[in-house]
Every structure is written in structure tokens, then in C-alpha cells.
Amino acid sequence: MFAFLRKLFNFALLCSVFLAIAIATIYYLLAPKLPDTASLKETQFQVPLRIFSAENQLIAEFGEKRRIPVNYNEIPPYLIQAILASEDDRFFEHPGVDYHGILRAVYSLATTGVKAQGGSTITMQVARNFFLSREKTYLRKLKEIILALQIEQKLTKEEILTLYLNKIYLGNRAYGIGAAAKVYYGKTLAELTLPQFAMIAGLPKAPSKFNPVANPDRAQLRRNYVLRRMWQVGHISQQDYQTAIQAPITASYHNRNVEVYAPYIAEMVRTQLIEQYGDEAYNMGLNVYTTIRAKHQKAANTALQSALISYDKRHGYRGAQNTTVLEEGMKNEDFKQILSSFSNIGPLHPAIVISIDEELAHLYIKDNEIIDLPLASLKWARKQLNTNRRGKAVTKITDVLSVGDIVQLHQDEQENWQLTQLPEAEGALISVSPFDGAVTALNGGFEYFQNKFNRVTQSRRQPGSGFKPFIYSAALDKGYTAASIINDAPVVFDNPSDENVWRPENYSGKFFGPTRLRVALTKSRNLVSIRILRDIGAGYVIDYAKKFGFDTTQMPKSLSLALGSGSAAPWDMARAYSSLANGGYRVEPYIIQRIENADGDIIMQAEPLTVCETCAALTISEPEENRTLALRPAERIMTAQNNFIMNSLLRDVVRYGTGRKAMSLGRHDLAGKTGTTNDQIDAWFNGFHPELVAISWVGFDAPKTLGRYETGGRAALPMWIDFMKVALDDVPEEPLQQPVDMITVQIDPETGLLAGPDTQKVISETFREQYVPTKISPPVHIELDSSDQDLEPNEELF
């Protein structure tokens, strides 16, 4: 018996030696070919690109994988316990390989001949997820074991568990527990309950099979299994277990929670980063913080859409979007099915007319609601015959609607549903802080996902009268004053090369004779602008405009430039008008304030040109990487005196001229200029407060007339007013500050000369010291157009 035991011992020893040799051989053959597990300490997860507003509110997220990495101390204990109970309850005890589990798997294989699941620890799963493929072979299993042992030597248990919980796929494009909490519950990890932790912990085994959205019954079984395991290993009490398994399934799919709707901005940022980093930008975990202010952006979206809907209604109804035959007995579910192929477009909701009474039309809205439209709300919907003509007045509902019509509805300011239609015209709005060029709001069209063309940056249109302030400013530099007299009279230009004759006119077709420069700009007199341009020269004006950032290659070297016949995008107009608003400095609009990497380190910080009247030019001797951010002073491109006069003139445009509707805001610190091009093809309002510039534009993408009377003051100014009403609601009134070397004197408004003792009408005018009139107005003179009142037609052409 003793001899037998000795032989058995020797045999076991020999087997152990052979096993040790085999293990050592396998290790030394495979280990050198395996990845370095130390690299796990430098792991960079694939985290999507996120774009935020200035207030850190989410604008957009780009990337295939939704992931929100968390640190170990941010993981609730219940979730750790749930994961370990269901995946690896001996995680904190084994060295990376659970020999008990492996022996169970080997025993199952030996007795049944079937490869059993199990035996993989969390550390082994980390090895597989980071370094290996998912093929099921014995060689891969050996590599997995070796890597797991090495990982345990390089990382702590907490580090391993954190890597695992941030890496695993949990269904619905959610990678990691942070993203899963958002995707399934719309909450952070700290806000989840015990049953919800158990639900997430049950997903790693089979994310599709146990998905609580797609397979709630299976998911509930898996959740309850996790809860039972937590009770069995002592993490929760029996009472907690019994309560938790009774909890209903509360998971539902939560899409990205966009807090600020600014898709045109998101696309601008995305494009810039893809150009800089390539497709890796989608996975680097970059957080981009823009200059967009949430309040301004929301106001811009609403103002633009409201302006285009209002314009569209002024020109009549084009009919139902579609029509279908309704059968008797149809219910809401049937109507919902009919509308399933029609999507919301911005604020527009598809609806179907289900019945009509004498005074009411009854419609089913896609969002599962039945509403009534009274006849009074349809009065605008006269049939559109062409841009300038509409059909007969609406006297009954059936003049507009029929049962089965599929139409668009929107809610007005009182949240009442109104019939509308998708506007054919488009618009753009941009607002900029004039002191450094920070873009606070940008909307490039009625709805980005309907038409992605960004009219703020990509659409170059004639600015019309919106270019006149830069001609007038150039004239001031040439010695003109706000009291200079220019003749508003007919003028004819022959062009011998093509035998054409150009006879420019004012918008009204009238002529007003000798006119002060202030009145000419206030009333937007075209013929005055042409005479000024002819006097100072188109070449001089083009060179002057270049200082404001205009692309001078788009400007004709002819007198038509006086009517704004060049081309510019709203972005360009915002840049140029910022110089008028900020005292005369050149700034550049920008949208990215800073970019942070996945670790929160700032890798890009904007250093915009900034207005600083007391700053000298900065001389920086230190290398850029060794210095803190320094203010970059903007270049002065207008004298303070010229800028003051231009602000005074443009404030008069709002008080008395083509922009006077803006006085509805109840402020006296607003300035701006309308712009309307020939045949009303483009309508602009370029306006500003000392702290905010805003540019609005309305027109068709394929240029054609907006219709009779659709000037900048009618089509574009309401958009500007609606935006500024919100953007300036908490901004105090700011009076215009007069700079040094300027003198205010009494003048005769009919001659622009100093008022004499016999002058019947006297007004005040401010001059640069060297240009103060020295002559006194004669007591008898012809009557000139010098009124500052609001009695004449306002002129807008180009």
C-alpha cells in the first residue's frame, strides 16, 4: 500500500513537473507576442465629439459610440455589487484567473463534450475587449489567461473594474455604464435606483437579448436574476430583493438631449474639426465650447421662422401638401398611420382634415391630438395666383380646406394652432458681440434638416442700401459732414460700349432736390449716394470697404456700387457693422471659444481681436507655450469722430427713417440700415446696439422677386425686432458718447450752414472740429429738402 502511494505521488509529481514545463513553454512562446498590458494605463476611450453653448448646454454630439467615461469613485456601490454578483463574484479575491471557474468549464467539457460558457473573469474580459478578437478558440483562451495575469500585475483591481465598466457594450450604441444610464433612463448613475442598477448589470452577458427596450420580458428575467445573486452573496437584504423584483420596467430609449437647437453651428464646428483632425475627431472625446448664447439662439430660431411664415402668408395659400381619401369609421390610429410618412419641419406639424362643419374644420395632428380651426383663422389663405396677386377673399372653410387634405399647422404666440405652409422663401440671422466678434446666435435657414445650405456663410447676395453707410463713412473721411448738401435730382449715365442708358431712381420714383447728408441716409436716397460715390471715386470706396472685411473682388468699380450692387454674406455684413457698433475697430466673427480633450485639458483657446481703447500694441517676447493668453487689440479702422457721426446717422435711420419699426422696442440706443435690392430680390436689416450686432436677411435661394413692397423694412426688419426684443430685454439703455474734438452748433437745416439771427428753423448738428461751418446761412434762400420729420416716403432701391 505504501509503495502504491509512493508511485502515485511520484506520478502526480511528474505530471506537475510536465504541467509546469508546459505552462512555462506556452507562456514564453506566447507572452513575447502579446501586447504590453501597461498601455492600459494610458487608455483613451472612443468618446464622441460634443459641442456646447457658452453656458455649457449641449448643442450636438457626433460619433457612432455613445460613451460617458466615469471614474471609480463615481460608480455607485450598488452597481459595482450588481456587476460582480452577476459577472465575477470572486473578482477581488482571484489573481485575474478564477481557477474554480476554469475547472468547472473543463469538467463540463470532459463530461458532456460541449464547451461551456463561463470561467472568464472581469480581468480576462478586459484582456479580450482591449487586446484580442472574439473568436472562440483554445489559443485565444490561453492568450486571455496570460494577459489577465499580466494586467493584474500592472493595474489595481479598481483600475481594472473601471476600464471594464467604461468599455463594455450595453446595447443601443451605449458603451459603458455612464452612457447606458443616459440611454435607458435619461439620468446620471447617481440618480438610478437598485432595480435600474440591476437592469444595467444584466446587459453585458447579451445586450440585444436582454435589452429592456426591445425585449422587456427577457430583460426583467435577467434583472431579477441579478437581484437574486446580489441577495445570495449578501449585498442586499431579502426585503430589498423582494421589493426590487416587484418594480416595473422603467427603461425607454433616450436620444441625445440637445439643449440648444443650433444645427448650422454644429455643422460649422464639425466641418472645422474634421478638416483639422480627420475622422478621429468623432472618437477623441473632444468637447467644443462655442460662443453661442442659449437665449440668443432660441430667439434667433423663433424670429427667423416667424418672419418667413409671416412673409409666406402675405402672399397667399398654395394648397394642401397632399390629399387622401378617408373612409367612414376611421379612427385616430388610422389617421396616425396616414401621417406616419410626414415629418415635422421646424415648428410645422403635419395634420389631416377629418371633417368640416359650417364654422369649424376638425384636424388630427400627427402628435395624436384633434384640434379645431375656425373660419377666422383661415382668412389669410386666399389662393396664391403669383407673387403679387391673390385670389378672392375666403368666405367659407371649404374655400381653403377639404376633407382628406394633409396640411401644415403651427402654434402662434398664444399657443393656438394655425394653418400654415412650408415657406418657399428663406432667411438668415446672425448676431455678434462687436467687441471681440463672438457669434452669439446663428441660423442659416428655416430648418437645417430640410435644407442644409447655410445662408449666413455660404450665400453671397447684393447688400443693397445696407452698403451705403460705408460710402457715407468714406465721404466723411473725404471732408463731408452730416450737414453737407447733395442734390437729389435725376441723373442719366450713358454706356457707349453697350448702348445702354442707366437712369437710377429713388424707390418712390420721386426726387427731392438739395438734401442734407443726414436726411439722405435716413431716407435711403439712392441718387444722393450715387453723387457722393461719383465725387469721391469708386476706387476710393472699394479700398475703404476693404478695411471692414468686404471681399473687394465682388465689388463693381462702377457707380452701381452706390446702390449695393456688390455681393456679401450675412457673416460679412456682421463683421462690417461690428466696426460701426464698437467705436471703429476691426474684429473677426468666431464661434469656437475653446476645445477640451477627453481629460479636460484645454487644447485650443480662442484669442480674438478685441476692442481695447487703452491698449498699446502688445510686444510678446516669451515663446507662446510659456505665456498666458494675452489680449490681442483690434486695429482701429475708423476715427472715433467718424464713427460717432455714423452712429448718429444710423440711429436716425431707426428713429425717423426706413428702420423706424424698430422703435417698437422702446429703446433709443438702436442703429441700423435697411437694404432692398432691385425688384425686391433681397431684403436686409443690418442693425446694432452698442453691445450686439444682428443681421437679418430674407430672399429666395434662386434669386427672384419677393414681391411688391417686400422691402428690408417689411420682410427682414420684423425678424431683427423679434430677435432683439429677447436679446436686449435685460440690457440697459446706452447713450451715444461724443468723443473729443467735436463741436455741436446750431445750423439752418435747409443749407447746412450756421444759423443766423433771421434763420426761421434751427437744428443742432455735431461736427468734427476742423469741419465746423464758418458761413452763416443767408436770410433768404430756396427751400431745400432738409426735414428730420417722418413725413416723406422712405427710399430703398438696392
Image (spheres, helix red, strand yellow):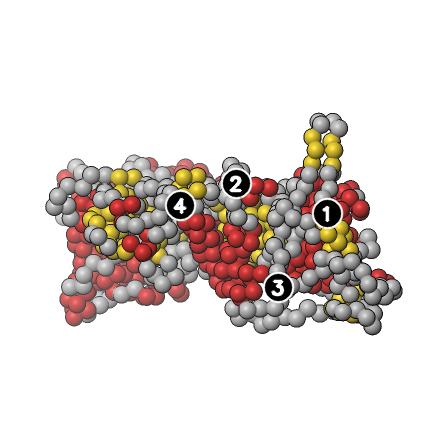
**Separation (CA) of disc 2 from disc 4:** 15 Å
Asked if labels 1 and 4 touch by Cβ distance under 8 angstroms, the answer is no
Pick whichever of labels 4 and 1 is earlier in the sequence: 4
Q: Earlier in the sequence, mark 2 or mark 4?
A: 4
Q: Residue 406's x, y, as percent?
A: 28, 43
Q: CA distance from mark 1 to mark 3?
A: 25 Å
Type of amino acid under label 3: Arg
**Residue at (78%, 67%) from the top-left corner?**
747
Q: Position of residue 757 (x, y in %)?
A: 83, 72
Q: Which mark is residue 316?
A: 4
User: Could you say which is closer to the camera, residue 369 or residue 54?
Assistant: 369
Q: Which mark is residue 489?
A: 1
Q: Residues within 10 Å of mark 1 (few under 14, many from 20)?
A: some
Q: Of 552 and 285, which appears nearest the observer?
A: 552
Q: Nearer the viewer, residue 216 or 60?
A: 60
- How much space separates mark 4 and mark 3, taking CA atoms? 32 Å
Name which residue type carries label 1: Ala
Residue where numbered disc 3 is placed = 655
SS type, badge 3: helix
- Of callouts 1 and 3, the N-terminal one: 1
Q: Which residue is mark 2?
A: 705
